[in-house]
Image (cartoon, helix red, strand yellow):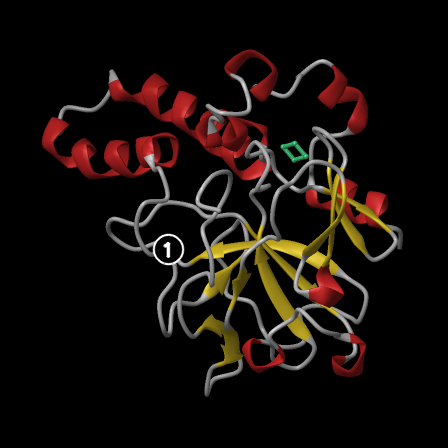
């Protein structure tokens, strides 16, 4: 399966849709990127937007207003978070867009997918690219001690202007906004385009019950700035 087919399977924004949904950095300027608007581009955020609309539609039929406070807060946090604190920590599970934990046999070599930290109070979504290659394929730049079973994880938020790194060209991870290119086999180092620095790596391991978990937070700043 090609990267494009995988992305289609994962529900990523298609190239024709992207053309009608220009990079928000074009209006906000690269110095003032908006990670939150980019979350709207991510499929999971789109799902949440639809869920949010459904929730609003049902509010009129609900009388227990107090019970709505918590879910409303959790739904809006994805748009408010500015990545100022730790996202992952030791033992936090990686989950898919449905919240399901990722078993160690989830991907075959050469495949990739998008995962998130298992939700918990105060922590919003943090799209993360999970890739898998033969362990021997990783070269200089990748902290091999932070990989497990051929899996490596990197932030999905482009370090240039905050777009989602949602495309792929062979093994190279590609940001669709300005064709930023990152090599997952060399620590997601920049191999093309304007991104000023690599995607930060997430240290991961396999839990005693066979699921992928973080062993700490990203090893560098997520998204633009912080370089
Ligand atoms: S946001 Fe410009 S290359 Fe990714």
- Identify the secondary structure beneath mark 1: loop
Residue ID at (78%, 70%):
108
Q: Quadrant of ligand 1?
A: top right
Question: For this rendering, which residue is in front, 129 or 62?
Answer: 129
Residue 105 found in image quarter: bottom right
Please, is residue 82 above or below residue 142 in the view? Answer: above
Q: Which of the 4 image quadrants contains residue 71? A: top left
Local crowd size for mark 1, using a 10 Å CA cut-off: few (<14), some (14–19), many (≥20): many
Residue 211 or 214: which is nearer the viewer?
214
In-image side of 200 versus 7 (left or right) = left
**Residue 159 at x, y percent in the picture:** 57, 42
Q: Which residue is mark 1?
A: 87
| Residue 42 higher or lower than 218, as above or below | above
Q: Position of residue 196 (x, y in %)?
A: 61, 43
Percent position (x, y) of residue 51?
44, 30
Q: Residue at x 70, y 45 (%)?
A: 10
- In the rendered structure, the answer to whether residue 184 lies left or right of residue 221 reads right
x 49%, y 54%: residue? 116
Q: Which residue occupies 17% across, 33% down?
A: 69
């Amino acid at each position: 399966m090609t990267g494009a087919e995988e992305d289609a399977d994962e529900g990523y924004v298609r190239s024709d849709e992207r053309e009608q949904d220009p990079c928000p950095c074009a209006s906000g300027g690269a110095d003032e990127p908006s990670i939150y608007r980019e979350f709207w581009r991510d499929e999971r955020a789109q799902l949440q937007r639809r869920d949010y609309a459904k929730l609003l539609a049902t509010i009129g039929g609900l009388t227990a207003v107090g019970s709505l406070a918590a879910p409303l807060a959790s739904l809006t946090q994805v748009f408010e978070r500015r990545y100022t604190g730790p996202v992952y920590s030791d033992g936090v599970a990686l989950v898919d867009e449905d919240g399901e934990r990722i078993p160690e046999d989830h991907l075959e070599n050469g495949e990739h997918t998008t995962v998130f930290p298992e939700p918990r109070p105060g922590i919003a979504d943090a799209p993360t690219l999970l890739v898998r290659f033969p362990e021997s394929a990783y070269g200089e730049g990748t902290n091999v001690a932070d990989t497990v079973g051929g899996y490596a994880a990197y932030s999905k938020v482009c370090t240039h202007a905050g777009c989602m790194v949602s495309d792929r060209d062979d093994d190279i991870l590609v940001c669709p906004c300005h064709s930023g290119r990152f090599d997952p086999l060399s620590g997601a180092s920049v191999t093309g385009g304007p991104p000023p620095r690599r995607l930060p790596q997430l240290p991961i391991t396999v839990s005693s019950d066979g699921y992928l978990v973080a062993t700490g937070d990203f090893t560098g700043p997520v998204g633009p700035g912080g370089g």
